[in-house]
Image (cartoon, grey):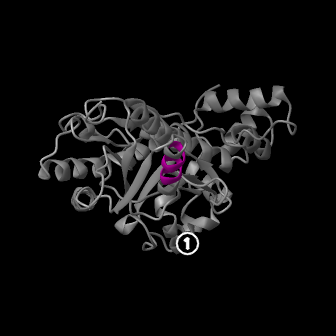
Amino acid sequence: MARSSTRPTSRDVAQAAGVSQAAVSLVLGDKWRGRVSETTAQRVREAARELGYRPNLAARNLRLGRTRTVLLVVPALTTEFFAGVYTGAARVAAEHGFGVVLYPSPEGIGPARDPFASAQTALDGVLASSMAADALTAIRGDQLPLVMLDSDPEGSLGAATVNLDIGDGVRQVADHLLSLGHRRVLHLAADVPSWTFELRARELAARMAAVPGTQVHTARAPISIEGALAATETALTTPGPRPTAVVCDDDKLAAGAYKAIRRLGLRIPDDISVTGLDDLALATAIDPELTTVRLDAELFGERGMRALLAVLEGALPESGDIPVHLVVRGSTAPPPGR
């Protein structure tokens, strides 16, 4: 079969295969099953291959109302963790011919300016972190196919959810400290109204309360080194028995806690142990290296994007939380006197 000197059309394929253009559209759109025979489908594919025919995806997507573009809504672009989420999500999207628009919500949470005249006409779906969920209303993204990351399965705008097993990560931290003999713990909590941080507080309190004689004091701080430094310094100088361990919701908070502890003339871990959660690069840049929970951000992004693609196809996303694990380093030891 000779190739045409001009770009072949679906009509050329139909003539070469001896079928209608409608049949060509069904076969090349992979919607032929039950509508044309296997033999006809094979004949269409062979004709298209021989002619060098490539569908006009832009025109096809326009007809179908599909842009093959999804929006990833994150709290900030400057966060190492969400950079990993984007990398994983974009990798899976590219494998399926989709593009990803990255949309940071200002100040980490809250409404954001609409990046499109109408999100519904510019996008096929949205993948959003619960920390930036309020931005969805502003861009009307909650009216599109939606998957929520790090979000309460019972209250995520009716959307599918993909979660890391943060609860288990916190339990691993608590069990590690309890096994070392710690009973007085300062919880340096992220001052962010988000389900994921509420979950951390609940799991830590429940795990510690299961052991008699434990105490958990909570100090809240914005996710910044300066905020964590101030909150930790205040908490550790409050009258009463000093905590022997600081459990931080985030590695950046842990870095601030390090500074506060050293300003007070205390040693890590000799006088006080510190744990984080994320396993960012700074976890091994500070001294001693930080005991923290490793979260696979790229895998998180990959699973999130696969879930959104499943939703777009009318299928059920993969179930089950993504496992996490504690990485024990030099910032934890038995409390003084043990």
Residue at image position (86%, 39%) is 35
Residue 94 visible in this rendered orientation of the protein: no
Residue at image position (42%, 60%) is 103
For residue 239, what is the image quadrant? bottom left
Q: Within 10 Å of the Cα at label 1, are there few (<14), some (14-19), or many (20+) other Cα atoms?
A: some
Q: Which residues are magenta?
A: 200-207
Residue at image position (53%, 52%) is 202
Image position, residue 129 (x, y; %): 49, 56
Instruction: Answer left or right for 123 relative to 114.
Output: right
Q: Camera-side residue: 145 or 34?
A: 145
Q: Is residue 205 magenta?
A: yes
For residue 226, what is the image quadrant? bottom left
Q: Residue flagged by tag 1: what amino acid is it?
A: Thr
Residue 202 visible in this rendered orientation of the protein: yes
In the rendered image, the vertical position of residue 128 relative to residue 13, given as above or below: below
Residue at image position (24%, 62%) is 234
In the rendered image, the vertical position of residue 204 relative to residue 125, given as above or below: above
| Quadrant of the rendering where the C terminus is positioned | top left
Secondary element under disc 1, as helix, strand or loop, is: helix
Q: Which residue is mark 1?
A: 137
Instruction: Answer left or right for 203 relative to 314.
Output: left
Instruction: Answer left or right for 302 relative to 142.
Output: left
Image position, residue 67 (x, y; %): 56, 56
In the rendered image, the vertical position of residue 76 relative to residue 244, given as above or below: below
Q: Is residue 195 magenta?
A: no
Q: Camera-side residue: 52 or 30?
A: 30
Image position, residue 2 (x, y; %): 61, 27
